[in-house]
Structures are given as C-alpha cells and as structure tokens.
Image (tube, rainbow, N blue to C red):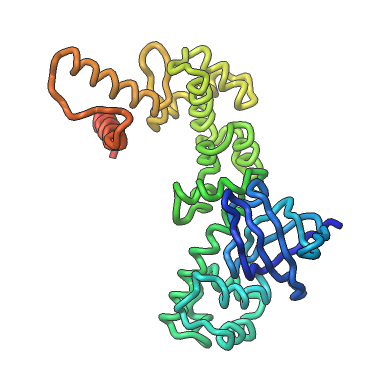
C-alpha cells in the first residue's frame, strides 16, 4: 500500500554507507517506521525535523509494518508540528523553550507561528519570550529553515534534492536568496537546459542579461568538458543561438559582449575561453616561462596543498589587470 505523509522524526539509525532507518509520527500522531536507501533521501534525518515522505507500506516478519521510502524531502514545519520541532530539534537546545513555552507560542500565534519565526518578528514573540530569547529563537529557526527552503526549491523545480548540501556549502547563508537573485547560479551544479527551464519558469525573460551571460558561460564550459579550451567566435555565436532558442546573431553578439564586460569569459584574439580555463592556462604558461628562463620560484606542485593559493594569486593578478574591485 502506498503512503504519503508529513512526519516529525523521533529516532534515527543512520546507515553506514548512507540512508537510514528512522521513526516518526504523522500529523495524526500515528507512529511509523521508515527504511530509506541513500539514493532516496538527501541525508539521514535529524530527530525533531519534519519530512515529507512518499513510499510503500510493507510488512516485515520481525519488525512489522514499515514504509520503504521512495522519496523523502525535508520541509519546514507548520501548524502544531512546530511544537515538536522546537522541543526535539538539537538546534533549539539551550534556548529554554520547554513544552509550556512552545505551547504558549502556538496558543498565541497559531498557524502564523512559522511566518512570525521566518520573518524574524521578535516583537510578536515578546508576549511569551524575552527579547533575548526571541532573538536567539529566530536565529536558530533561520539556520535550520534555510536548508528546508533550499530543498523545497530544488524539489519544486525538478533538481536532485541531494544537491542541497552542495548548494549550502557554497552559500552557507541566504542560499535561496542567491538562487532567486540569479537562478543561473545553479549552472555550477546542473546543465544548461534544466537551469534555463527553471529560470524561465521564475520569470526570467528571453533577453535578460543574466540569461545572456549564463548562456555564453554554459556553452564554453560544455566545450571545455569536451576537452576544448578555446572556441572560435563563429562556433560560439552558432552555439548561443541554439542554446537561447533564437536565430539572431545580433542578440548572440550582444550576449558575448556582455559576458566580456562582466569578465565571465576571456577573448584571446583567436577565440574565447571561460574565465576558469583562461586563469589556469595563464598561470601554467607563466610558470613554464619562469622554468625555461631558469628563474627560482616557490614550489608549484599542482598536487600539493599550494594549489588553492596558486589559483587565488592568478585570479587576483587577472582582476588587477582588468581593473576589477
């Protein structure tokens, strides 16, 4: 029997190679046992979290009924689920939010509680908590709610929700704000077609400057994946017309010009390169010249821990040459 439920996690037994067996209660308070392989959930749940679960209920001869998870996604708690969330999630430990205060918050604010917390409305929490406690609660809520928001965003637009961990590693704070500001930032994690489809659904126009620059970068990085570090102008223009769904060379040229102005790509005189490839080639070429000239220099082992500083120095030198802040 198939089941879809929103559950508050109570106990978790993480798998040694990913996945987990965990327990939770649905909105009616009914206890459920879940079995999830690592390819079905973004990570092992944490006690107190709220998850949206879809799966198949099966009977195990030893453990009884359990749900084999087909899709599990972290969600923001709403309604009375917030009470258990505040009481059980480790992010709220030490804040002095016991059952009495959590219940009073629900009695005072009801279904608006998650909105008040998300908006950071400390004043409305003041009838139950001190200003200091309310501020700490808001900060803790934002920290844990951010992940759920990113997961929901990715899930809504058809991305693998396990990308949420990688997205939040790049932007530990306000990841969702970054993605909404420029949805094409998702090109760091997914291909052009999927990211462009999402961006257009969010209202990005066909001739939006963000789309133009992203299309140029995406095409050049696709060429780089095919082992081509340099792309001829005619090939780039033709590729852009295809990627952007228009046969207008003037629009394609404008996109390339904009990408150059924003230093997203580099014009070598013979063709174009994505910035990353240009930086690496320039750094390697400069070092080879130093070696051929017999000039001493620091250790430049590309497999050593020096690599991040080498790349940072090369980027800084290019930014200075271009007059970037």
Decide: is 253 above or below 16: above
Q: In screen coordinates, is 152 left or right of 281?
A: right
Residue 260 visible here: no
Give the image location of residue 86, x and y in percent: 56, 75
Quarter where residue 99 is shown: bottom right
Give the image location of residue 156, x and y in percent: 67, 49
| Furthest residue in direction right, as rendered | 1
Decide: is 303 above or below 70: above
Give the image location of residue 248, x and y in percent: 59, 20
Q: Which quadrant of the rendered structure holds the C terminus? A: top left
Residue drawn at the location 25% of the way across and 34% of the way down: 313
Give the image location of residue 314, x and y in percent: 27, 30
Quarter where residue 36 is shown: bottom right
Residue drawn at the location 45% of the way across and 85% of the way down: 130
- In depth, the one of 58 and 275 nearer the eye is 58
Residue 287 visible here: yes
Q: In screen coordinates, is 22 left or right of 147?
A: right
The mark total stands at: 0
Residue drawn at the location 40% of the way across and 32% of the way down: 262
- In depth, the one of 160 and 176 nearer the eye is 160
Q: Which quadrant of the rendered structure holds the N terminus? A: bottom right
- In depth, the one of 256 and 107 nearer the eye is 107
Residue drawn at the location 47% of the way across and 12% of the way down: 232
Decide: is 183 above or below 50: above
């Amino acid at each position: 029997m198939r089941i879809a439920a929103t559950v508050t996690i109570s106990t978790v037994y993480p798998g040694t190679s990913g996945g987990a067996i965990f327990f939770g209660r649905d909105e009616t308070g009914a206890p459920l046992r879940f079995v999830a392989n690592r390819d079905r959930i973004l990570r092992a749940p944490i006690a107190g979290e709220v998850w949206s679960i879809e799966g198949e209920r099966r009977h195990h001869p030893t453990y009884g009924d359990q749900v084999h998870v087909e899709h599990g996604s972290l969600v923001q708690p709403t309604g009375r689920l917030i009470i258990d969330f505040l009481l059980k999630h480790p992010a709220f430990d030490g804040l002095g939010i016991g059952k009495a205060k959590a219940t009073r918050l629900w009695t005072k604010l009801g279904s608006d509680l998650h909105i008040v917390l998300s908006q950071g409305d400390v004043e409305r929490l003041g009838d139950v908590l001190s200003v200091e406690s309310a501020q700490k609660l808001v900060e803790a809520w934002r920290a844990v709610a951010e992940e759920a928001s990113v997961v929901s965003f990715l899930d809504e637009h058809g991305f693998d929700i396990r990308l949420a961990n990688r997205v939040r590693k790049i932007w530990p704070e306000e990841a969702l704000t970054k993605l909404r500001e420029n949805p094409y930032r998702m090109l760091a994690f997914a291909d052009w077609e999927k990211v462009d489809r999402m961006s257009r659904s969010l209202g990005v126009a066909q001739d939006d400057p963000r789309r133009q620059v992203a299309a140029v970068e995406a095409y050049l990085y696709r060429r780089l994946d095919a082992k081509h570090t340099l792309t001829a102008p005619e090939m780039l223009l033709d590729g852009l017309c295809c990627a952007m769904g228009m046969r207008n060379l003037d629009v394609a040229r404008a996109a390339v010009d904009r990408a150059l102005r924003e230093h997203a790509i580099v014009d070598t005189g013979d063709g174009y390169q994505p910035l990353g490839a240009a930086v690496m080639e320039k750094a390697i070429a400069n070092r080879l010249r130093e070696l051929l000239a017999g000039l001493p220099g620091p250790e430049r082992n590309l497999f050593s821990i020096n690599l991040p500083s080498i790349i940072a120095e090369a980027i800084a030198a290019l930014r200075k040459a271009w007059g970037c802040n």
